[in-house]
Image (spheres, helix red, strand yellow):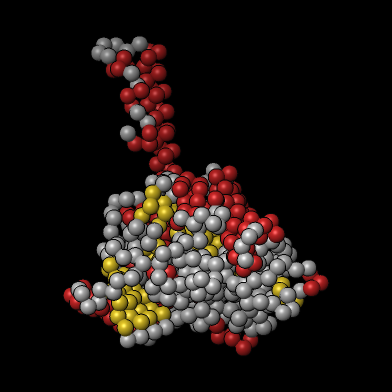
Amino acid sequence: MEAGYDFRSLSHDHFDEGPVPMHRFGRLLLAISTLNAIFLTEASAESKPPNILLIMCDDLGWGDVGFNGNRQIKTPHLDRWAQQGVVLERFYAASPVCSPTRGSCLTGRHPHRYGIFHANRGHLPDAEVTLAEALRQRGYATGHFGKWHLGTLTTQIKESNRGGPQNAKHFAPPWQHGFDICFSTEAKVPTWDPMKKPPNASRLWWDPIADEDAVEYGTYYWSGPETRVRHNLAGDDSRVIVDRAIPFIEENTLKEHPFLAVVWLHAPHLPVVAGPEYTQLYKGHTKYEQHYFGCISALDNQIGRLLDKLTELNIVDNTFVLFCSDNGPEGKAGNAPGTAASFRGRKRDLFEGGIRVPAFASWPNRIPKNRRIAVPMVTSDLFPTLCAEASRSKEDINSIGPQPLDGIKLMPILVGEINKRNRGIGFQFTNQTAWIEDRYKLIHRGDRKYLFDLLEDPGETNNLADQIPAILARLDHELQRWIRSCQQSQEGADYKP
């Protein structure tokens, strides 16, 4: 029975033949009226567009979270929320580095279509339509909090990796791409005391230091044109970010205004720095591990705080939440603490460890909880999925912004209506290209070709390129056709005058 209500609770004596006594007739009308009110209320709730909360970590490996089997790093809040939703076992970042992946989330398109091929290269073109722009046209409030990495944020002063007059052509801040509220950095910051560093800072980690012993890190938070944020910037960087996201969520909930909150945390990108309350959780480990594990536990606390706020505000049931990472873990296996679990490769690789990332989705009103899905999904899917859910109409998603889109609508998979993607996912990065479908994966690395059966061999240990040439040829044909399409996009074919 829909919505958990059972009409059999109306006893048979309401429908006896013959005259109905007035007191019984009144009770019947009251019961029918109550049921109508319930169903109308629920229909109204279901017709409301969902709030949207997109959380992304930076360089978090597939195996760095408890819900994917890690028993060393403490992530109780992530694990609890993953259980309340659905774990996405084959969720892919569109690129094995950060900037290109972030652009794919906002556009639904592979980064080779709009010119962000690597981190700190290019910028998000004005001609691209972002998720924030599309949802703002549908009545959403939009906010970006954390790492932007899709262009510089100031043309006036030298800051971060590229900011300043010397790179004015790459000025592309979030407030020019559809975001009403911003608390954003161009690139990475330390994960503790994000505005400062020791004079002789290591690239990897350091212990928190006193102000008098510190120098400026050189990357700043910006809230608008040449408006640098200078307060509440000490301590855990994940808390600093969530401190800005929560008021945005509260304010728009009070106004009964649907919102898009994009929360892109810096942790655990290098340099990893954790406060003493977090490093002490990992006594007996190396200092590098203490800070890496500690900053993940710190971000876990903040995600717990953020998602618990949805419950407190009574909006959790109608909020779509997606958590993921932007690529695989940094460093060489064995020398760096992040882990891709049993997957081959790491950040900068198109092997699974570089692009398969930890992820879960939650939307209690729509998505059945406590499941794991092994259907391939990619960050480019977010744009068409969320535009469709925000409009709740027969609107053609392919009419929003430049075409073609590389993403698909995920809701039929998330709710369990279908269990296959039935459409390949393409990747390009440096001298690597790849094509992934439901079962097989083709990789070109320089002159070498690899073909893997990901269902039988997710660790990519058995190259089948010489054993099943027909499948290799089919996937290669699809990959080359997609690469040609991306090249046409780069040449401006997708942008109408």
Image quarter (top left, top right, bottom left or bottom right) of the N terminus: top left
Residue at far right of view? 212
**Which of the pair 297/363 is nearer the observer?**
297
The x and y percentages for residue 180 are 57, 64
Residue 372, position as x, y percentages in the image: 38, 52
Q: Is residue 435 above or below residue 310?
A: below
- Residue 410: x and y in percent read 36, 58
Residue drawn at (75%, 68%), measured in percent from left and top? 209
Residue 177 horizontal side relative to residue 396, left or right = right
Foreground pick, 435 / 232: 435
Q: Quadrant of residue 173?
A: bottom right
318 to 420, vertically: above or below: above
Is residue 472 toward the left or the right of residue 387 in the image? left
What residue do we see at 34% from left, 70% from top?
460
Viewer-closest of 268 and 314: 268
Residue 290: horizontal and vertical position, in percent? 62, 63
**Residue 142 in view in this figure:** no
Relative to 3, say whether 238 is above or below: below
Q: How many marks?
A: 0
Where residue 456 sits, quadrant-wise, is bottom left
Taking depth in this image into account, of 458 and 136 the one nearest to the observer is 458
Quarter of the image where the C terminus is located: bottom left
Residue farthest along the bottom direction in this orientation: 166
Residue shown at the point (39%, 30%) measured from the top left: 35
The answer to whether residue 69 is seen in the rendering is yes
Is 222 positioned to the left or the right of 48 in the image? right
User: What residue appears at the point 31 percent right and 14 percent down from the top-left corner?
Assistant: 13
Vertical placement of residue 49 versus 218, above or below: above
